[in-house]
Structures are given as structure tokens and as C-alpha cells.
Image (tube, helix red, strand yellow):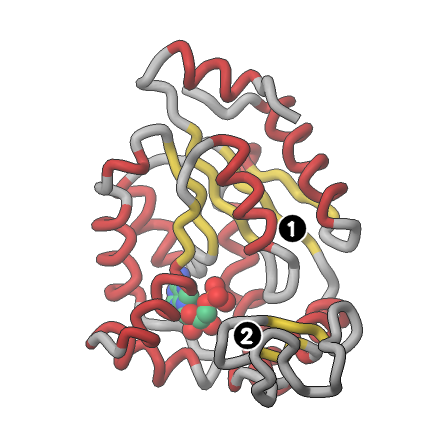
Amino acid sequence: MKSLVILDKIGEDNNKMVKIILFGPQGSGKGTQAELIEKEFGIPSVSTGNIFRDNMERGTELGKTAKDYIVKGHLVPDSIILRIIENRLKEKDTKNGFLLDGFPRNKVQAEGLAKITDVDAVIEIDVSDKESIKRISGRRTCKCGAVYHVFYNPPRILEICDKCGSKLFQREDDKEDAIRKRLEIYHSETKPVISFYGEKSIKINGEQSIEKVFENILSELKKRNPTK
Ligand code: AMP
């Protein structure tokens, strides 16, 4: 699946960049696609959710502040997010571009991003609320980091981790009430932001296999060739 025009351009001229935003509701498979895009283009995926989870695990001040919002399914304040993004996009590994995952999540964040940098393409992975809830509410996590799904990837013994034998649990923000709250925010605040990007936005059907979704993303990007 290599040899995209985008990659050739990066190779020819170091000033060419690929700057992508990935949108999709919880359970759309956004994280999985972000990893695939990251490998394909050699650009880092910047996930604000992962930045927070990492900080919460390490017990940093940022992690402590974010946790109160995250467990309730609320958004972390824009001023915090914009500061994180501004600093992160100054790091060296973004010299060929970046993939933003989970940001911007509302109009204020999109306007803030526009002051920091422009973007080349905006990908929206589309799945219904019903499918999102089914995927997320079935997720079970282990303290060792392993993740299962009651329908799609169940452990060998009910509720017990295959890897370490610990009892699995459901993350607070994966419970149905929190997911509904997060989906509500996605529809009311995040989705309208996509129209902000006009013709740069690409809608992909997320209710297909991982491989098919990725294939669709690549062919749409190739058509548009988002390099500068
Ligand atoms: P995610 O893994 O992207 O769903 O992020 C997990 C949680 O982190 C979200 O439910 C929010 O509470 C918080 N979060 C992540 N990204 C943002 C953002 N751009 N703006 C505000 N809150 C965010």
C-alpha cells in the first residue's frame, strides 16, 4: 500500500508536510486507524486522550486536573488543550507533519489550531451511535493494560485477563451513561467543527473491517494529495 504521491513528495523535499486531522466518535476505530496512518506516512499521531491517560498514570498535575473531567465524560478546558497542542507541535518529530486524533473537539479549539498551523486533510470516520455504544460498552480493561471486548475479543475465561489472570473491569468513561454523554458532546460540539474545513474533509464509512476503512482513507487521500 506504499508509493503514495504524498510519500514521494516528502522524500523529494523536506519542506513538504502532511498535516491531517482524524475525527470520529468514540468506538469508531479512530485510534487503530491513527496507528496505521502514522506508520504509512512516518508522521506522529498526536492524541490528546493518550496524553491525558499517560499523565493520569504518572500522577502529574496535568493528569490530576484532567481526571475530574474525563471520568465524567466532560471535555477538559480549551485553554489547557491548546497549550498542550501548541507545545507538542513544536517538537522535532512533527517536521514531516502530524496526525491529530481527538483534537480539535469544538469551535474554540479549531480556531486556536488555525492560529498555530494549517491542515491538509480532515478525515471523519462515520459510525452510528448504536454501533459506538455496542463497541465501547462491551470493552473490558485489565490493570496490566490488556483490552478485551465481550463480543469481539472475549478473554478465554469470563472477566479474567488471559495475560495476567487479574479480574477485568470496565473503565468509568466506558460505562453507558458516560458514552452517551460523550456522544452527545461529539454531535453537538465536535461534528459541526468538520464543516469548518470545507472541501478538505473526507467522510469514511467506519462500519467496515479495519483493512477496508484504512484502504478507503488512503485512496481518498491519494485523490486529494494533501501536500504543499
Ligand atoms: P479520547 O480518548 O480522545 O476519547 O479522550 C478521552 C477524554 O480526554 C475525553 O473524553 C475528554 O474528557 C478528554 N479530552 C481528550 N481530548 C480532548 C480535547 N481535545 N478537548 C477536551 N477534552 C479532551
Q: Is residue 195 above or below residue 82?
A: above
Where is residue 139 shown, x and y percent of the image?
A: 65, 76
Q: Residue at x 44, y 60 (%)?
A: 105
Q: Is residue 115 above or below residue 175?
A: above
Q: Earlier in the sequence, mark 1 or mark 2?
A: 1
Where is residue 27 shown, x and y percent of the image?
A: 64, 65
Q: Is residue 212 above or below residue 135?
A: above
Residue 182 — which label? 2
Name the foreground residue: 134 vs 118: 134
Amino acid type shown at disc 2 = Arg
Element assignment for label 2: helix
Residue 134 — which label? none
Where is residue 45 shown, x and y percent of the image?
A: 43, 46
Ligand 1 neighbours mark 2 (CB distance < 8 Å): yes
148 sits left or right of 128 in the view: left
For the C terminus, the quadrant is top left
Element assignment for label 1: strand
Seen as rendered, the residue at the extreme front is 164
Q: Is residue 163 above or below residue 36?
A: below
